[in-house]
Amino acid sequence: MIEQIYQIVKLNFRLEWQERQSYFSILIYILSSVYLSYLVFSDVISAETWNAFFWVIFIFSAVQAAYRSFHYEADQRFLLYYGMVKPENLVLGKIIYNFLYLYATGLFTALVFTFLMGNEIHSLGAFLFILLLASLGFSAILTFVAGISAKASNNPALPAILSIPLLYPQLISLSRVSLRSLTGFSWEVNAPLLIVLALLSLVSLLLSFLLFPYLWRD
Amino acid sequence: MKGIWWKLLGLLLVLFSLVFGMLGPVQRLPILNETIRVLYYHVPMWFAMVALMLTSLIYSLKALNTNNLAQDSYAFEAAKTGFFLASIGLATGMVWARFTWGAFWVNDPKLNGTAVTMLIYLAYFVLRNSVEDPFKRIRLAGVYNIFAFVMMIVFIGILPRLTDSLHPGNGGNPGFNKYDLNSDMRPVFYSAVIGWILIGLWLTNLRVRYKNLKEKHEQV
């Protein structure tokens, strides 16, 4: 099982690397949206606005990055997978791939933010940990939604419509706890919120894992 | 549920709560005063909404296991009724908020939860409409419905408890908790809750039957 998941993750990296423009388009997407907020809001940047912009841009670039997750499987390759790969393994492999991808995206967004808007991060370790939790929960939900929209139709708005409301519970807790990592962080005080976030990610992971086989069979 | 008794019961309970909600005695609390009567017209909608969404979830689970189109359409109609009840709850709540908080909409965890719940179910409706094949729709909409219900419970059941809300009974505001709700109000409130749940189920039933008749008519 672990071997198969590892193969799926590796295959995904190789396939995406062959079509590098999808990676570059995400980078440009982030650069241009951060620069947009820099142009419009550079005078009023405080820790609060930094935090708000960061999460809004991160959520949209995460949706952009993940919605193509089942792009390659969308047509003929489906048939191949049915026989070879168990859906549980497939979804776990995709979630792991998206998790790595989203974490890299988040780090890049944070880097561009610090470059353009100044370094507001007070406790870097806490911020990186929060970003890790965020990527985990986001990748679980976004992979699942990408599976739905790959099967549903070619409605381009569908991934965003389906996933953003499901991400709100995490996003509200995330922006609250990450604001504290910008202004001064105490692990003891924020432990309950971090546990809630971890539990939310766990619930999303479990749901994706359990429901995906229903989605996948035809 | 078979028979007519539960429909009549629901009707009677709702009528009772509508009339005695206006006429019955209530206690005086600071700020709330007479607006405490909104308890009968606002809070039961949320109970009924959760009950209807639970019904929708149960039918989605059944449909996923049996691939039965009738159960799938019951799940859809139950979610629609739940959404309708949520809209009524939102409307009554907004009128009340205008008089006690001074604004129709404030940044409150419970209001956010409601808004997000309604957005999630709107997404569910959009998803249903963008899938043509009815058997594919059972699976796609079914799994999304399960996700939607879990996130709704997280949003209206767990997150508001982590922070204070402006709502009566939360964060030291006077209100509807067990110490404030007196014995005059309780019967009216409970009958409103049960009555609206039954009315919601009846409404769902009617919609499903109407849709079936329409499909038959189109086939003929």
Image (tube, helix red, strand yellow):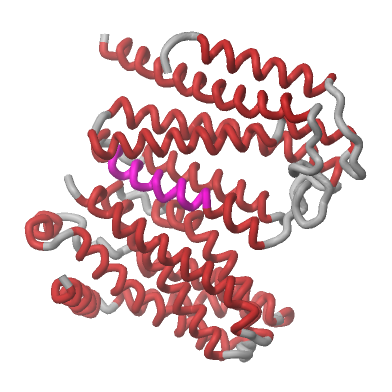
**Quadrant in the picture for the C terminus of chain A:** top left
Please state the horizontal and vertical placement of residue A43, each as a whole percent of the image: 73, 81
Would you say the magenta stretch is mainly helix, strand or loop?
Answer: helix
Quarter of the image holding residue B12? top right
**Quadrant in the picture for the N terminus of chain A:** bottom left
Whether residue A36 is visible: no
Is residue B97 shown above or below A43? above
Q: Residue at x 19, y 78 (%)?
A: A10
- The magenta span reads B137-153
Please state the horizontal and vertical placement of residue B191, each as a whole percent of the image: 66, 24
> For this rendering, which residue is in front, A44 or B83?
B83
Assess whether residue A40 is covered by the magenta stretch. Answer: no
Is B18 left or right of B139, judged from the image as shown?
right
Is residue A26 shown above or below B198? below
> For this rendering, which residue is in front, B108 or B104?
B108
Please state the horizontal and vertical placement of residue A99, each as a whole percent of the image: 36, 74
